[in-house]
Amino acid sequence: MGLLECAMIIPMNLSEAVAMLIGRPVELVDLLSEADRRNLVARLRVTSGADAGRTVIAKQTVGFDLPDTTEEDRLRFFREAAAATLLTRLAPGEHTPRCWGSDRSTGLMIFDDLGTDATLVQPLLDGSAGAARSAMISFVRRLAAIHGATAYRSADWDRTVTDLGAPAALLTEQVLARYGRGIDDGAQGLDRLQNELGLSPAGNPHGLAAELDSVKQTLTRPGPFTVLVHNDPCPDNVVITSSGARLLDFEFGRPGHALIDGLYPQLPFPSCWCCNRVPDDLGAELAWFYRADLAVRIPQAADDALYAEATVHVMAYWLLMSFESIAEDVPVESRTWGIASTRSRALTRLDTFIHTANATGRLSELAELAQRIRAELAVRWTEADQLPIYPGFSAAVG
């Protein structure tokens, strides 16, 4: 059976599956996902009992139990189920919609319905500067709250993964080790990019290797900064409610260094279609709010030297993750993803890392190489520039 056929059949049985999972009779209200999407998302209404009239959201991986469903699709379900379960146990509904339950045999999860509240996309693209600023502050403070709540809770994450029957690959030590392999892959992408651009190797290859190793140590051994990271906190995954921001879709959620999420506004938004920049003064303000809130639960965040090192190392990690895609962009026409070109994204990420490395006096070899890459790309990509400011701020910075 193909995925599309499966998607057409599932709604007929969804009400029954949801009712069995949450122990309440329900009726289907409407389907929220398109027929060709990987996940089926629907709104259902409880029809009797104390919760009668209340609506919930069902999310199911289409064809979860079929042989042709990929391992990555299954891991996405288990990552989100583990994250939602843990956050619901710690603070029901505070950080993400409360999870009513999940079924590992069918890839089904049930959440509270947040209704029609806007996501972060709306104020950034269509709102006023004041609304966009308030929404962004709420967003970074929610990130800090999630990170603070899950700090020192690796054992709780591992217990949740085990209780769900999820693969051992999601256990903390195995997840952290994969960041190291990702950095190794990023170093190979850097080599490919240098070759594509015809650049000479780093002037001090041993120094560069030592710097990459230090980045690897930060990402694979984050110590007190080990938290649950969303890993994809894009504007469309952030709902702005009357009581603050809530995060959705933890399909890439896992243990990791807090700044993997915490630096998203500064990077900016490396995994997102809705990617522009915030004004520089707001970026500094957002960084201050995030760090101040994080330091309440992770006191090491108040250590200037430690935090500066962590910041530049995590920025280097995200830059390394992008070198392969930058290399792919060199010989082809400029491409647009979402609201920005891939070239503008690359130039902005290079500029952000170079500025931070120089300002902190760290990772000088990688920064020098990034500067040479940036200069060569400027020659080749004459039409490309840094990402623009989000339209929501345009009146304030115009």
Image: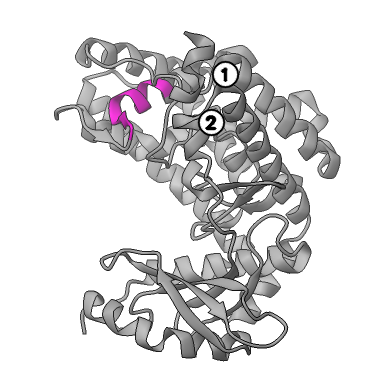
The quadrant where residue 329 appears: top left
Q: Earlier in the sequence, mark 1 or mark 2?
A: 2
Q: Nearer the viewer, residue 142 or 147?
A: 142
Q: Which residue is mark 2?
A: 315
- Horizontal relation, residue 223 to residue 6: left or right: right
What is the C-alpha distance between the residues marked 1 and 2? 8 Å
Region rendered in magenta? 339-348
Q: Nearer the viewer, residue 217 or 57?
A: 57
- Horizontal relation, residue 310 to residue 152: left or right: left
As drawn, the label of residue 95 is none
Q: Nearer the viewer, residue 227 or 215?
A: 227
Counting from the top left corner in percent of width and height, residue 267 is at 50, 29
On screen, residue 112 above or below 221 = below
Q: Which residue is mark 1?
A: 356
Q: Is residue 241 visible?
A: yes
- Horizontal relation, residue 49 to residue 27: left or right: right
Under circle 2, the secondary element is helix
Total numbered circles:
2
- Give the residue type that dot 1 points to: Thr
Q: Residue at x 35, y 34 (%)?
A: 323
- Give the residue type that dot 2 points to: Met
Q: Residue at x 36, y 87 (%)?
A: 12
Marks 1 and 2 close (CB-CB < 8 Å): yes
Magenta: main secondary structure equals helix
Counting from the top left corner in percent of width and height, residue 162 is at 63, 78
The quadrant where residue 202 appears: top left
